[in-house]
Image (cartoon, rainbow, N blue to C red):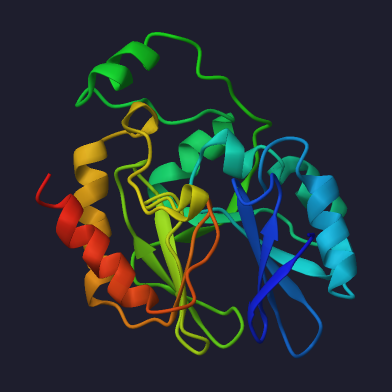
């Protein structure tokens, strides 16, 4: 399965089954915005998905990264070479990490995070950031794509709300692996505590479909299911 249509002009691209997802937004003029580029070998699957949509890599004019981890930025350098994008759009707090080709430090608010902070996290090919995103920015994507700063997984982690279609992309703020809502692994968060705090904003947003960079989307009662998870998880 190379591409999953979530709504008109909004598509999910599984790059490692449903375990790692990128997203594509199409425009009336035929251009494409790509959100996240998967791991280093993901570009081949992204190109295949674009072909299924009747698109060529050269139709991709903008690449947005939700955050600076190698399972989202690992394929970015190759996708820049294949497309007409001149660089990356990303939150200002992750710019230095993307341009250095490294993940932000893991946090010290969990034992696993402190352990992983001492070992080599691995990196990715550096990419230049030509558009800095800030909280609340409306990106000129498919009628308007709102950037929501949800720090914690990384300092500059963002989620994205496409209000026209009612699609929320949570990024890694919440996982839906095997169709079960869960927090991202604490070991790979800059601060798992801050991640949970910032993700609470999802309870107040208006959306119909919840989409995840890890796991399949939720199409039925998405907001209610996410709000239920937040309420339960907040008591743990």
Toward the viewer: 34 or 140? 34
In the rendered image, the vertical position of residue 128 relative to residue 147, given as above or below: above
Using residue 175 as the reference point, say whether residue 45 is left or right of it: right
Q: Nearer the viewer, residue 9 or 178?
A: 178
Residue 118: image location, x then y, percent: 38, 9
Q: Position of residue 200 (x, y in %)?
A: 21, 61
Kindly identify the residue that appears in the image at 85 percent across and 47 percent down. Answer: 44
Q: Residue 205 at what x, y percent from top left?
A: 29, 77
For residue 35, say whether it is visible: no
If the image is split into quadrants, where does the N terminus sit?
Answer: bottom right
Q: Is residue 207 above or below residue 84?
A: below
For this rendering, which residue is in front, 119 or 48? 48
Query: Which residue is found at the position 36% from the left and 42% from the top?
Result: 153
Horizontal placement of 23 versus 145: left or right?
Answer: right
The residue nearer to you, when weighing 137 against 201, is 201
Q: Is residue 83 left or right of residue 191?
A: right
Residue at the spot 82% in from the left edge and 62% down from the top edge: 49
Q: Quadrant of residue 149?
A: bottom left
User: Residue at coordinates 33% horizontally, 83% vertically from top-left?
Assistant: 206
> In the image, is residue 75 above or below residue 233?
above
Position in image of residue 126 (x %, y %): 65, 34
Query: Looking at the picture, does residue 143 appear above or below residue 188?
Result: below
Q: Residue furthest left?
A: 235
Give the side of residue 222 with respect to residue 194, left or right.
Answer: right
């Amino acid at each position: 399965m190379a591409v999953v249509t979530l709504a008109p002009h909004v598509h999910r691209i599984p790059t490692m089954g449903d375990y790692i997802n990128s997203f594509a937004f199409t425009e009336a003029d035929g251009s494409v915005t790509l959100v996240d580029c998967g791991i280093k070998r993901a570009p081949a699957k992204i190109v295949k998905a674009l072909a299924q949509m009747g698109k060529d890599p050269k139709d991709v004019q903008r690449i947005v990264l939700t955050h600076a981890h190698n399972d989202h930025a690992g394929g970015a350098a190759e996708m820049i070479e294949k497309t007409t994008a001149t660089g990356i759009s990303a939150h200002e707090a992750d710019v230095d990490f993307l341009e250095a080709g490294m993940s932000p430090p893991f946090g010290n608010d969990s034992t696993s995070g402190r352990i992983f902070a001492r070992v080599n996290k691995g990196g990715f090919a550096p990419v230049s950031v030509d558009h800095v995103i800030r909280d609340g920015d409306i990106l000129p994507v498919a009628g308007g794509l709102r950037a929501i700063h949800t720090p914690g997984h990384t300092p500059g982690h963002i989620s994205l709300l496409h209000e026209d279609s009612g699609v929320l992309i949570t990024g890694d703020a919440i996982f839906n692996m095997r169709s079960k809502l869960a927090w991202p692994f604490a070991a790979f968060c800059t601060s798992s505590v801050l991640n949970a705090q910032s993700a609470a904003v999802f309870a107040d947003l208006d959306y119909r479909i919840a989409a995840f960079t890890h796991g399949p989307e939720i199409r039925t009662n998405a907001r209610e299911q996410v709000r239920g998870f937040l309420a339960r998880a907040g008591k743990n």
